[in-house]
Amino acid sequence: ATGLPLAVLFGNFLLSWLETFPIIAYQTLLNDDLRMTLSTISSYYAVTYMPWMWKPLYGWISDNISIAGYHRRPYVAICALGCMACCLLNAMYVRTAAGLYATSFFNSIFTAFAQLMMGAFLVDLARGDMASAADFQGSANAAKQVGSLSAQVMSLALYGGAVGRQSAHVAARPAIAAAATAPA
């Protein structure tokens, strides 16, 4: 058993952190900055979660279309850049509900694709070392949980329970911009 490569552990940690950290910032952006109605927010989440259903398509793409002879790494890099670009657009330029719908939709595509690629790395590694497959999965899950926990602790420190109130320590847009650094 050689153990899970550090890059895969770190990738799982960062992906989970990126999904968790900006949640409160996005809630503040939706409610306070863009003043979306409850029905618009419901539609927003319905639309932005659609790309998660398309993971079989992302898997087909990565299995059948190689980039420079690779089937996983280039897609992880493309997705990381895509997530970063979407977060930066949301933080700096998006001022309308339609703009947020679009960038968040594409961010979901990049995030879901990256998450699938991280899982595919685990499958690829397990094929080479079946005796360690459970250890690989456990280590990846631990990295994800630590990523989520650290993001929540950081959010608590920054927001201090101030969802929907102006007393938050950090405004929504800078927090979303900070999240953009995770995939980089």
Image (spheres, rainbow, N blue to C red):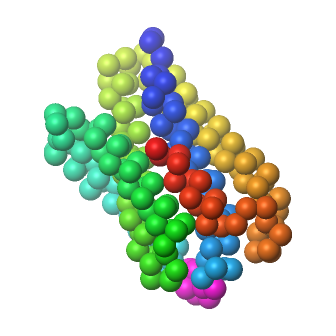
Q: Nearer the viewer, residue 117 or 106?
A: 106
Image coordinates of residue 87 in percent, x first then y, are 49, 61
- Compared with 173, 77 (above or below) is above
| Residue farthest top in this picture | 1
Image quarter of residue 25: bottom right
What residue is shown at x 32% (from left), y 24% (from top)?
127
The question of residue 36 being in magenta is answered with: yes
Answer left or right for 122 relative to 163: left
Image coordinates of residue 57 in percent, x first then y, are 26, 56
Image quarter of residue 32: bottom right
The question of residue 124 being in magenta is answered with: no
Residue range corresponding to the magenta coloring: 35-42
What residue is shown at x 41% (from left), y 39% (from top)?
118
Q: Is residue 163 visible?
A: yes
What residue is shown at x 61% (from left), y 41% (from top)?
147
What residue is shown at x 65% (from left), y 67% (from top)?
172
Answer left or right for 50 relative to 44: left
Predominant SS along the magenta part: helix
- Compared with 163, 44 (above or below) is below
Count of numbered circles on the image: 0
Image coordinates of residue 122 in percent, x first then y, are 40, 31
- Compared with 3, 116 (above or below) is below
Q: Nearer the viewer, residue 31 or 63?
A: 31
The quadrant the N terminus occupies is: top left
Image coordinates of residue 150 in percent, x first then y, are 69, 42
Answer left or right for 171 relative to 41: right
- Compared with 72, 48 (above or below) is below
Answer left or right for 39 relative to 121: right
Q: Is residue 38 visible?
A: no
Q: Nearer the viewer, residue 115 or 160?
A: 160
